[in-house]
Image (cartoon, helix red, strand yellow):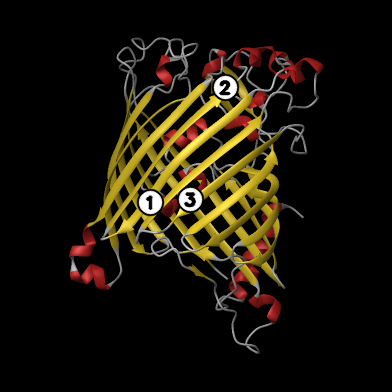
């Protein structure tokens, strides 16, 4: 059955059972108190018991932007040539996600999430800046339909849950909370999504739990593939597999812990370690001589109280054996789907903070109607080429970005966004201002 037909049938089923209150497949932790909650199944006799165990959710966002700078791939090599280039516009549907969960009982549950990226299912072509402006087809596993989650879980207690399958990897702020209502900007925060996989999801096994004011998680995963690394996006492409399976010759370990001791405040620490070279297909003998060790550490927080929302993160990463990346077989092979010429940095970082105040909290009518209007500002700085070997050749990758805007929430599941942003580059390059408008939504239908 084609995927679109599956979702049409699924949506029709959801509409037919629209008043059902479903039982969640996992406990959720409250961002202000740290307490956990679980939805209660409907009373027996109203609906079939199987339907009372089912959950169905949807989320997505729509974006419109006008960029007041050149989109020519040579704009960094020849900044003077493109200094006065005309603006360009883009309409986009970055994501549309459908999630399904089911509680089998006796601690067993199931969850899955499928995401449509950029509004279509096809091979996309792009002008590749790292290849001198050549046209390249963008190859991603599953095209532009992405299976983000497919797992089964056994819950032994509130503090002990085991999940196996294709799971979200909660490294950094964006990967732990990436729904449209989890950030102020129209698009996902730029720094983290540049240097790390976003949203990061891989096949493996995880252990998670909640105890007192802490939530913790440890995962054993298939390792990232160094063939997918590049100068412009560091290890972002390391999860992409052009074959029908996820390559797991090498492994990685991810861990995260969050604390909710202070009312309204969550502080999180996360990290990843794994070997990346030799984790490709086919495995060549020269690839296994090097480890390509990858270590990433992230600190992030969210404060939501007194009509303020403040979020911040700091990420730093190290990658070993980078001088060998250009010699890997799949990067030398011109017909492979990987970058062949880019030099990958041994270090990368991303730091960002945003703050918004709900001005409607001061208007009695809006407050009573539970409408919100956050006026926000964001600052971030990032560089996927931060080591001494790459920072001069790829100096344009060091970015400071500012954003100012508003988020209007007519209901708690919908947000309308507008922002002005500007990428501030080094002196010899042209800054990149833009205006964006977006709509995001997240809802639980069943």
Q: Residues within 10 Å of mark 1 (few under 14, many from 20)?
A: many
Residue depicted at 40% across the width and 9% down the height? 78
The circle drawn on residue 41 is: none
Q: Nearer the viewer, residue 346 or 202?
A: 346
CA–CA distance between discs 3 and 2? 25 Å
Label 1: which residue? 302
Q: Are marks 1 and 3 in contact (CB under 8 Å)?
A: yes
Q: Earlier in the sequence, mark 1 or mark 3?
A: 3
Q: Is residue 205 visible?
A: yes
Vertical placement of residue 225 versus 116, above or below: above
The x, y position of residue 361, in whole percent, is 22, 64
Residue depicted at 52% across the width and 64% down the height? 28
Q: Is residue 75 visible?
A: no
Label 3: which residue? 177
Q: Nearer the viewer, residue 390 or 148?
A: 390
- Mark 3: which secondary structure? loop
Q: Quadrant of residue 349?
A: top left
Q: Nearer the viewer, residue 168 or 245?
A: 168
In the shown orientation, is residue 202 left or right of residue 36?
A: right
Q: Residues within 10 Å of mark 3 (few under 14, many from 20)?
A: few
Q: Are marks 2 and 1 in contact (CB under 8 Å)?
A: no
The x, y position of residue 277, in whole percent, is 69, 23
Q: Give the label, 1 or 3, closer to the camera.
A: 1
Vertical placement of residue 80 versus 272, above or below: above
Label 2: which residue? 230
């Amino acid at each position: 059955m084609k995927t679109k037909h599956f979702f049409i049938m699924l949506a029709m089923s959801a509409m037919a059972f629209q008043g059902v209150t479903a039982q969640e497949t996992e406990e959720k932790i409250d961002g202000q108190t740290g307490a956990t909650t679980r939805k209660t199944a409907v009373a027996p006799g109203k609906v079939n018991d199987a339907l009372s165990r089912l959950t169905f959710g949807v989320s997505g966002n729509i974006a419109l932007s006008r960029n007041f700078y050149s989109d020519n791939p040579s704009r960094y090599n020849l900044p003077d040539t493109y200094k006065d280039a005309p603006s360009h516009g883009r309409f986009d549907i970055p994501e549309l996600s459908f999630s399904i969960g089911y509680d089998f009982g006796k601690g067993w549950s199931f969850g899955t999430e499928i995401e449509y990226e950029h509004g279509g299912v096809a091979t996309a072509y792009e002008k590749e800046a790292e290849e001198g402006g050549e046209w390249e087809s963008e190859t991603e596993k599953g095209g532009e339909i992405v299976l983000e989650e497919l797992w089964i879980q056994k819950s032994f207690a509130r503090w002990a849950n085991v999940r196996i399958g294709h799971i979200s990897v909660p490294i950094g702020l964006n990967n732990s909370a990436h729904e449209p209502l989890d950030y102020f900007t129209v698009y996902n925060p730029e720094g983290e999504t540049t240097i790390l996989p976003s949203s990061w999801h891989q096949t493996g096994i995880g252990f998670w739990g909640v105890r007192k004011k802490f939530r913790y998680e440890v995962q054993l995963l298939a390792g990232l593939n160094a063939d997918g690394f590049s100068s412009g996006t560091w290890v972002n492409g390391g999860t992409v597999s052009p074959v029908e399976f996820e390559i797991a010759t090498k492994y990685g370990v991810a861990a995260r812990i969050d604390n909710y001791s202070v009312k309204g405040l969550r502080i999180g620490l996360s990290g990843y370690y794994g070997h990346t070279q030799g984790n490709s297909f086919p495995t060549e003998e020269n690839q296994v001589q090097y480890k390509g060790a990858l270590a990433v550490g992230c600190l992030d927080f969210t404060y939501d109280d007194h009509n303020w929302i403040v979020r911040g993160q700091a990420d730093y990463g190290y990658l070993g054996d980078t001088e060998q990346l250009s010699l890997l077989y799949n990067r030398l092979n011109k017909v492979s789907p990987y970058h062949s010429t880019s030099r990958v940095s041994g270090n990368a970082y991303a730091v960002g903070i945003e703050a918004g105040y709900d001005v409607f909290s001061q208007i009695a009518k809006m407050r009573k109607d539970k409408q919100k209007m956050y006026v926000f500002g964001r600052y971030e700085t990032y560089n996927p080429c931060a080591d001494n070997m790459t920072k001069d050749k790829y100096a344009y990758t060091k970015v400071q970005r500012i954003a100012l805007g508003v988020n209007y929430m007519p209901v708690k599941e919908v947000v309308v966004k507008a922002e002005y942003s500007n990428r501030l580059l080094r002196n010899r390059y042209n800054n990149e201002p833009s205006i964006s408008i977006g709509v995001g939504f997240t809802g639980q239908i069943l």
